[in-house]
């Protein structure tokens, strides 16, 4: 048994990152069995889910969509807000039932929730039918843990450490067109509300040549788009070499010639002019930046530990808009942080008016055990926070719609990813600026970048039709 420890997870003691090669477990014990996997949380967790799928695939297993059919169940969890927790514990109710009927099913819990001591304690005490608990630092141990699993035994193996960097990680990728590529793991920012630095460990960058190699291999396999992943992509490189920064990596990835490059998430604090220039200079770096604001009140930003003021944010935002042609910028905003007054909230609305974001993810503050903000005095009633969220969302949606309406009648390149869920006669895809478009065109165009004429604009999507070659000229 190896239990997580939040205090240990906070330590940042070493500058040395160990680079290791991952060895995959192969065995015939699970050949022909079925697995059921659910992933919650951010893109990084989704990408971890692709590693979990690769491990299960190597063991000879195939996926199934029904919990009741599975021989192995894996929940890859997220700890960012309380409702992420609730979803997982809700699922556990169903699983408990299933385990009564089919005690042989192996239940595994991984991801960020496993990294929290309160969660593992709860799993140990109240959910003993869970067989395997693993964390974000040892996904690769899932294979050996499964081979050792016994039906009435719970094995918890979670490490709270600064973390290593593994290369040659296998992924069973969800798409053959777009792919995620990790560039930096962990986070050292310790925003006072956030659990991620505890669940993901210290900031550690992959070597530039390893990232480039992965992108080149994806390009050779026919991938059209890569999304470079990190909790703060613009912290990339500093742990490897003082003079190395994200712009160097972006430029090297752009030079591979892959059709589209995206990256998430950017922190407004250390986004340099050089990064802006590289984004502006390369056609295959998409003009889309997710730049979390969190709050528009300097007092709250300070309490959040975000290390920038609203004025600095707006200046950076305007610089990006001026220098990167046609750039779309989206954001994250938290309402109801402890001590946020109505005046603070109105300041957030002011910044939203000044920036007129293309879109935003908005949240009510959720206290996370072990973070400084969870101990801050919070007297605002939930009802008031919900009203603030509602008011904010109205404004955000208004600007999203306005941003979409600017596309009406325009011709824009769209990478087509598959058949539209809503209308099976159409395909869906994304513009360079990350706008969702439903396009009337044939299935043979899946995986292609087509010029599309936008015919309708809604709050959250666009409709369009394929421009025939001759009319594009
Ligand atoms: N690394 C990214 C974001 C990671 S979490 C960044 O720094 O931007 C995604 C979003 O969840 C955050 O931007 C924040 O808006 C929100 N979030 C994080 N912790 C939260 C909490 N305790 N309560 C509510 N929202 C939170
Ligand atoms: Fe969390 Fe802040 Fe790190 Fe983003 S930068 S992951 S919000 S601590
Ligand atoms: Fe959630 Fe962990 Fe991502 S807490 S948002 S899955 S880093």
Image: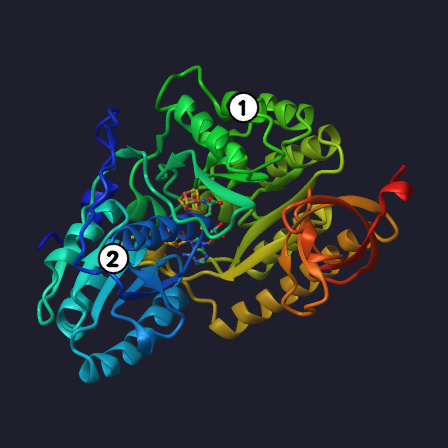
Residue hosting label 1:
247
Picture quarter containing residue 451? top right
Report the quarter where the C terminus lies.
top right
Answer left or right for 257 relative to 402: left
Q: Residue furthest top?
A: 243
Residue, x 35% and y 36% (percent of image)? Answer: 188
Q: Earlier in the sequence, mark 1 or mark 2?
A: 2
Query: For the point 50% across and 43% down, which residue is it?
Result: 179
Query: Is the N terminus in the top left, top right, bottom left or bottom right quadrant?
Result: bottom left
Q: Residues within 10 Å of mark 1 (few under 14, many from 20)?
A: many
Tell me: 342 left or right of 405.
Answer: left
Q: Nearer the viewer, residue 256 or 441?
A: 441
- x and y percentages locating residue 134 in the rendered image: 21, 54
* Near-viewer residue (169 or 97): 169
Note whether 167 is above or below 179 in the view shown: above
Q: Would residue 290 be seen by someone viewing this image from the given angle?
A: yes
Q: Position of residue 101 (x, y in %)?
A: 20, 84
Give the image quadrant in which the ligand numbered 2 is located.
top left
Image coords of residue 90 (percent x, y): 34, 76
Colour scheme of the rendered structure: rainbow
Q: How many marks?
A: 2
The residue identified by callout 2 is 114
Determine the secondary structure under disc 1: helix
Crowding at dot 2, Cα within 10 Å, few <14 / some 14-19 / many 20+, comes out as many
Rendering coords of residue 460 (x, y %): 69, 61
Q: Quadrant of residue 376?
A: bottom left
């Amino acid at each position: 048994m190896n239990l997580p420890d939040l205090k240990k997870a906070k330590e940042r003691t070493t500058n040395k990152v160990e680079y290791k090669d991952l060895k995959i477990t192969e065995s015939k014990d699970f050949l022909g069995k079925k697995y059921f996997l659910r992933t919650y949380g951010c893109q990084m967790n989704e990408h971890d889910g692709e590693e979990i799928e690769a491990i299960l695939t190597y063991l000879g297993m195939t996926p199934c969509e029904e919990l009741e059919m599975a021989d192995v169940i894996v929940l890859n969890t997220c700890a960012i807000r309380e409702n992420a927790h609730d979803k997982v514990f809700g699922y556990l109710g169903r699983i408990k039932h299933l385990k009564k009927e089919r005690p042989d099913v192996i239940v595994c819990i991984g991801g960020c929730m496993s990294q929290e001591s309160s969660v593992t304690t709860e799993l140990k005490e109240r959910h003993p039918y869970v067989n395997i608990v693993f964390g974000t630092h040892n996904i690769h141990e899932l294979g050996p843990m499964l081979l050792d699993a016994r039906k009435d035994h719970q094995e918890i193996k979670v490490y709270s450490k600064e973390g290593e960097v593994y290369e040659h990680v296998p992924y069973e990728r969800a798409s053959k067109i777009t792919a995620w590529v990790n560039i930096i793991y962990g986070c050292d920012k310790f925003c006072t509300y956030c659990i991620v630095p505890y669940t993901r460990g210290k900031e550690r960058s992959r070597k530039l040549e390893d990232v480039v190699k992965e992108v080149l291999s994806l390009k050779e396999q026919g991938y059209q788009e890569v999304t470079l992943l990190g909790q703060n992509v613009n912290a990339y490189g500093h742990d490897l070499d003082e003079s190395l920064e994200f712009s160097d990596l972006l430029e090297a990835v752009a030079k591979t010639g892959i059709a589209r490059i995206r990256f998430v998430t950017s922190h407004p604090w250390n986004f340099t002019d050089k990064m802006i220039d590289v984004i502006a200079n390369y056609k295959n770096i998409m003009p889309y930046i997710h730049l979390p604001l969190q709050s528009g009140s300097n007092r709250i930003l300070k309490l959040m530990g975000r290390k920038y003021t609203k004025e600095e944010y707006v200046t950076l935002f305007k610089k990006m808009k001026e220098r990167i042609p046609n750039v779309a910028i989206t954001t994250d905003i938290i309402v109801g942080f402890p001590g946020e007054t109505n005046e603070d909230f109105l300041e957030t609305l002011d910044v939203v008016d000044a920036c007129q974001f293309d879109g935003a993810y908005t949240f009510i503050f959720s206290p996370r055990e072990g973070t400084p903000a969870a101990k801050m005095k919070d007297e605002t009633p939930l009802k008031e926070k919900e009203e603030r969220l509602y008011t904010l969302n109205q404004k955000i949606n208004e600007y999203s719609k306005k941003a979409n309406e600017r596309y009406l009648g325009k011709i824009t390149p769209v990478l087509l990813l598959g058949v539209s869920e809503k209308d099976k006669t159409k395909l869906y895809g994304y513009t360079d600026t990350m706008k969702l478009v439903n396009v009337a065109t044939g299935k043979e165009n899946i995986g292609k970048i087509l010029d599309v004429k936008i015919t309708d604009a809604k709050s959250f999507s666009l409709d369009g039709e394929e421009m025939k070659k001759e009319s594009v000229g």
